[in-house]
């Protein structure tokens, strides 16, 4: 079993009892995978993106425990620490890899200063899922598409999903 499959199992255990959160990260992972394939990412960047997609919301549970609530900012604050803890079980992940994953977790609700294609695809994949799960209005989806989306595949998926 590969690292991503092992991480999916670990995140499923971490989110035990919360099937909506498990379903969420699996959908973000799959959308990220599809978009990355279309963009032709190199192997390392793709691996960073896909690992991040699996663990991107790891900060939700600890935020709720620590603060009594969870929003994008608390997820970004708490997520990297808990991801690092999970990554201790994966000695094959080097420090630069872990640093980038943690950076992406710490910024996945920040849409300014997107500094790489891995970051771009992560926020687009997350939005593809959030827009449906949050039952966003069509006008809001169009607005976000215009402001945030850049990759042709993510735009295609969004347009198709919502018949835009």
Image (spheres, rainbow, N blue to C red):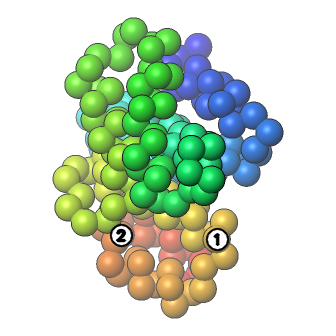
Question: What is the residue that sits farthest to the bottom in this orientation?
Answer: 139
- The residue pinned by badge 1 equals 134
Q: Secondary structure at mark 2?
A: loop
Query: Pointer 2: residues within 10 angstroms few (<14), some, or many (20+)?
Result: many
Contact between marks 1 and 2 (CB within 8 A): the answer is no
Residue 29 seen in the current view: no
Question: What is the residue that sits farthest to the front in this orientation?
Answer: 67
Count of labels in the image: 2
Q: Position of residue 119 (x, y in %)?
A: 31, 51
Residue nearer the viewer, 39 or 10: 10
Q: Position of residue 163 (x, y in %)?
A: 59, 81
Residue nearer the viewer, 64 or 38: 64
Residue 150 seen in the current view: yes
Is 150 positioned to the left or the right of 8 in the image? left
Q: Nearer the viewer, mark 1 or mark 2?
A: 1
Q: Give the quadrant of residue 96.
A: top left
Residue nearer the viewer, 104 or 162: 104
């Amino acid at each position: 079993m590969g690292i991503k499959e092992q991480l999916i199992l670990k995140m499923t255990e971490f989110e035990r009892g919360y099937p909506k959160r498990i379903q969420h990260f699996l959908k973000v992972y799959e959308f990220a995978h599809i978009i990355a394939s279309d963009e032709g990412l190199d192997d390392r960047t793709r691996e960073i993106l896909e690992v991040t997609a699996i663990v991107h919301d790891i900060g939700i549970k600890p935020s709720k425990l620590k603060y009594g609530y969870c929003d994008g900012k608390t997820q970004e604050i708490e997520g990297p620490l808990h991801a690092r803890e999970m990554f201790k079980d994966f000695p094959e992940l080097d420090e630069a890899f872990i640093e980038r994953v943690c950076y992406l977790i710490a910024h996945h609700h920040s849409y300014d200063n997107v500094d790489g294609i891995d970051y771009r695809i992560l926020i687009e994949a997350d939005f593809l899922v959030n827009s449906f799960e949050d039952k966003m209005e069509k006008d809001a989806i169009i607005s976000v598409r215009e402001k945030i989306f850049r990759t042709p595949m993510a735009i295609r998926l969004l347009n198709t999903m919502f018949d835009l």
